[in-house]
Image (spheres, helix red, strand yellow):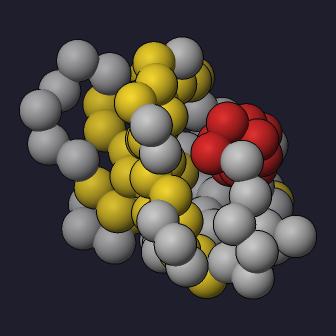
Amino acid sequence: MSTQDNERRSIISSTAGGVMTDEAGAVTGDLEIATRLDAESLYVSVRYSGADEWYAVTGSPVSLGERPSPADMHERVVSHLTRPGPIVEGNEEPVSLEEFSPA
C-alpha cells in the first residue's frame, strides 16, 4: 500500500463481478484502488493496475459523519470492494460503494 497524507492506494485482484465504476461500468482483474479523505467525504477511484486512467467507483464520494483515520477507512474500502457481489441469475454482480457504510 502506498500512502500520501490523506490518500492511500492498494493493488487488488477483483472477484468475478468486478468493481462498478461511473465511467466504464464494471472493471475486473488486477486493479489499483485509491482512497482520498477530505474534511467531509471519502473519494474512491480505481484503475487497471499499471494503467493511467482512473475511474470513480460507483457510490463515491461517501459522506462521512466523523473524520476517520485515512488508513482505517482505506482498509475498510478495500475489504468491501474485494468481497464477492450478489449472485443474480447465476452470475456475480459487481460491487460498489452504494451500500457502503463508513461508520
Between 90 and 99, the one lying in front of the other is 99
Q: Residue furthest right?
A: 103
Instruction: Report whether 35 appears left or right of 56.
Output: right
**Residue 55 percent location from the top left of the image:** 28, 55
- In the rendered image of this protein, does residue 6 appear above or below residue 102? above
Residue 2 visible in the picture = yes
Q: Which residue lies furthest to the left in this view?
A: 52
User: Residue, x 45% and y 52% (percent of image)?
Assistant: 36
Q: In which quarter of the image is residue 40?
A: bottom right
Instruction: Report whether 75 appears left or right of 19.
Output: right
**Residue 77 percent location from the top left of the image:** 68, 49
- In the rendered image of this protein, does residue 102 appear above or below residue 47? below
- In the rendered image of this protein, does residue 90 appear above or below residue 12? below
Between 20 and 67, the one lying in front of the other is 67
Between 34 and 31, the one lying in front of the other is 34
User: Residue, x 14% and y 42% (percent of image)?
Assistant: 53
Instruction: Report whether 57 appears left or right of 14.
Output: left
Residue 78 visible in the picture = no
User: Residue, x 17% and y 27% (percent of image)?
Assistant: 51
Q: In which quarter of the image is residue 64?
A: bottom right
User: Residue, x 52% and y 72% (percent of image)?
Assistant: 39
**Residue 13 percent location from the top left of the image:** 57, 23
- In the rendered image of this protein, does residue 49 appear above or below residue 26? above
Instruction: Report whether 45 appears left or right of 60.
Output: left
Q: Indicate the quadrant containing the C terminus: top left, top right, bottom left or bottom right.
A: bottom right
Q: Indicate the quadrant containing the N terminus: top left, top right, bottom left or bottom right.
A: top right
Q: How many marks?
A: 0
**Residue 80 percent location from the top left of the image:** 76, 49
